[in-house]
Amino acid sequence: MKKKRINYNIILFLACCIFWIYGIKKYPYRIGMSNDEEDKTFQESVSSFLINNLQYYNQLINLNSRKNMLLGTREILKDDTTYVISDTGSIIIERQESYPEDFKNSISELMELKKVAEDANAKFLFCLAPQKECYETAPANIKNYAKSNCELYISELIKADIPVLNLSEELDKHRSEFELFYSTDHHWTARSGFYANNAIIKEMNKLYGFEYEEAAMDINNYNIELLNKHFLGSYGKIIGLKSTFKEADDFEYITPKFDTMLSEKQVFKDLERSGAFDETVIYKGNLTKDYYSINTYATYSGGDFRLQIMENKLNPDGKTILLIRDSFACTVAPFMSLQAKELHICDVRDGEYYVGNKLNMKEYIQEINPDYVLVLYNGDTTQLDTRYDFFNDLS
Amino acid sequence: MLFSSIEFIYMFLPAVMIIYYLILRKRRYFQNIFLLIASLLFYAWGEPKFVLVMIASIMINWAIGLAVDKNRKDKKKSRMLIALDIVLNLSLLFVFKYLSFSITIFNGVLDTSLPVPNIALPIGISFFTFQAISYILDVYKGNSEVQKNIFFVGLYISFFPQLIAGPIVRYSTIAEEILTRKETLDDFLDGFARFVVGLSKKVLLANNFAVLADLSFDAVKNGESISVMFGWLGAISYTLQIFFDFSGYSDMAIGLGRMFGFHFMDNFNYPYISSSITEFWRRWHISLGTWFRDYVYIPLGGSRCSRGRNILNLFLVWIMTGLWHGANYTFIFWGLLYFLLLVFEKLTGLHKKSGFPWSVLGNVYTLFFVVIGWVIFRSDNISDAARYLLAMFGAEGNSFIDGMFIGWAEQNIIILIIGVILSTPLFRYLSDKTKESSIIRITKAGALFGLFVLSISALVSNTHNPFIYFNF
């Protein structure tokens, strides 16, 4: 009798069944996880729901990134953004060329803000944080205009008579000392934020005679705990942990050795904390190592809020600073709070995750009468950039 | 809904299989009704309004099929009914696919300004109207019995495995299987394996080649200059993309059909190893080629007529083949290119030459024109196609090599080599040689599982997953 041949595709089928069952067994299911759920069709929502609730979602992202790395893929197109692995193994994005007209709107808003500040007797300074792409080399086939865009923006700001501090000049001094930017994130490192704050303070001193505490600007007066391969940044979360040989970033947890007493208030959430540096302006919960669920970068300042007030109880005669910011200020604000009496941090960007309405900067400046109005933004700007919606009149 | 989507793999297919095999087990009638409903839902997922067009097509073709069968003995009447059916089906196709294009040509030629309607094209309309025509003609010719049950006609026309991207299944192929098919474990498992192969081809290969192809063609479309080498890289990438995308979809369709006991014909047979254009069209999109051969070319007289008439027949078939792919001059030019090459081969007997060195030279000649043809096919218009082709030959004053080529070639060299190897029958040859080895067969199953997981990871990562059949 002829022996029936075993069809070994049964192994394939059963393995896929087990894979499928394991994938869908995650419960409870999370619904409406992303900010743009409202823009999705029903079909897209179903697809998004299925994908986001797969048990092994993160592992699949990692697997795909490893596959890309092994194949030598250095550009990954995802959601209309091209993520690129630079020559140093850092993840960047393609930066198209900007033109002077791209900055027209933002400069116009800055000029108005400067006038409002000066009318309220506040000193004004615009601080431009460089983009990561200014320091990275993309493959030959990728356009990277980050550096030239930054230089163009600076020249346009100067033409408009806006006091500007180019923070890339400060970072350039430290290029060989430490990593300026995280490999897997678009932000600068905590140490970069520390030195950026030093540069801002010194510039305020140079321009306006701002008095500062020298000791708080010396890195040797801080404890630095290095957490190895601790942080998977925004870019890494999108394209996967294994996209580069570096995988996750090391993370420096910097806290003062000297005594501190601060309070930190999240006005719209009605939350207030008082205590030392690491009990107020630091959010230790974000230090937990979880590549995909936690944003460790937000250990400093806690993230992005409509209005956050940091008060330095040990500097009652200090100045009041209004800092209008984007997320690059997360690693700057905690150290800046040590140089001020009060640091009011405002975020005017659009976004559904913010609690509370956007503040009108004119009204707020008139309300708190700051001594200084600072704007800290990174160099990425477009015509419809809501970061420049200082007066709630851009839509 | 696409086969290469999480909702299909994790939701639709498991639900259909569970209901089909567990709940409706051994109830063939209800299984068929269920497959019809599932197919309509599958189509409605992506085209909620156009599913009514599909249902209308089913009803019309079913009714005409019955009428043709009833009037079989009255040749005049039955021919009129067939003509009516063809006119109705082609009218449907014309309105949705060719009306805007025709009005544009009309305006251009006669210098009028008739409004050009913006009509959305129902996905898969070219496939299901051709299947519907095939049904009527097979019934008329007596190749198959007429199907009196409207649901089963509907199942044939709308069956989800081959609905949106083929293969074009002849009614005579599956007429008996509608009621008397036998689902076997081997068919199910082999069908599933084939589905996984197709999914991998589409997601892991075609989608990667698409990134490169889109870059080069978009650059030309945007008026940018591309180097000679980048032009060739983009063209070759598209050549590989369309093969793995289309053959991958066919593999998935054939595999899915087999899982439900249906046996569709193969649609691709390693076309890029062809040593003549004639051979290429016996290996590429076989279901379309044979459809035109059996329903257009042969009824017109085929090659059993004068040379002049034969050339005319070829001309008509290739204009129609081009137009079938889309309403654009590029598709017409693409079709005409193949017409000229096939006539050339017919006149010179080139396609009959075999052995070394003809097989190698023939392969180079075939691939050269196939790649040129794909450039025309892929371009948005004739002007872009011309510019792209000129760039490929350095006739635009463009550089020979540039950073774009170097960067993209460096990063894609591995996937390009894999693509070239897999477009040959090497793996099939090795598979045939080792089919008796259990270890090899187990390893193959394991490797396919690995490819399945990699494909899912690519889909979940939401990387580039284009659907290129929107013109069809």
Image (tube, rainbow, N blue to C red):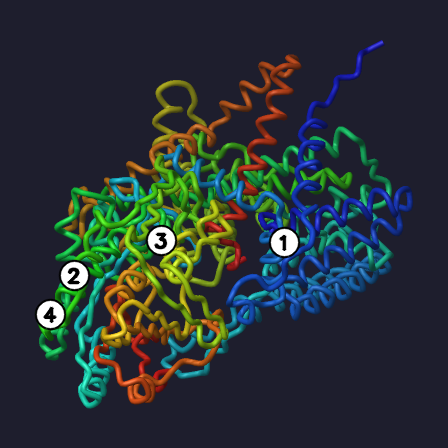
The reply to whether label 4 and label 3 mark residues of one chain is yes
In front here: B359 or A112? A112
Q: What residue would you read off at disc 1?
A: A50
User: Which residue type does callout 2 highlight?
Assistant: Ala
The reply to whether label 2 and label 3 mark residues of one chain is yes
Q: What residue would you read off at disc 2?
A: A199
Instruction: Report, in whole angstroms, how far the alpha carbon at label 4 lies from the one at label 3.
Output: 28 Å
Instruction: Indicate which disc, 4 or 2, sits on the residue closer to the N terminus.
Output: 4
Q: What residue would you read off at disc 4?
A: A155
Q: Chain of mark 1?
A: A
Instruction: Report, in whole angstroms, how far the alpha carbon at label 2 lies from the one at label 1.
Output: 47 Å
In front here: B140 or B400? B400
User: Which residue sits at x=16%, y=61%?
Assistant: A199
- Give the image location of residue A385, x and y in percent: 32, 74
Circles 2 and 1 in contact, beta carbons < 8 Å: no
Instruction: Indicate which disc, 4 or 3, sits on the residue closer to the N terminus.
Output: 3
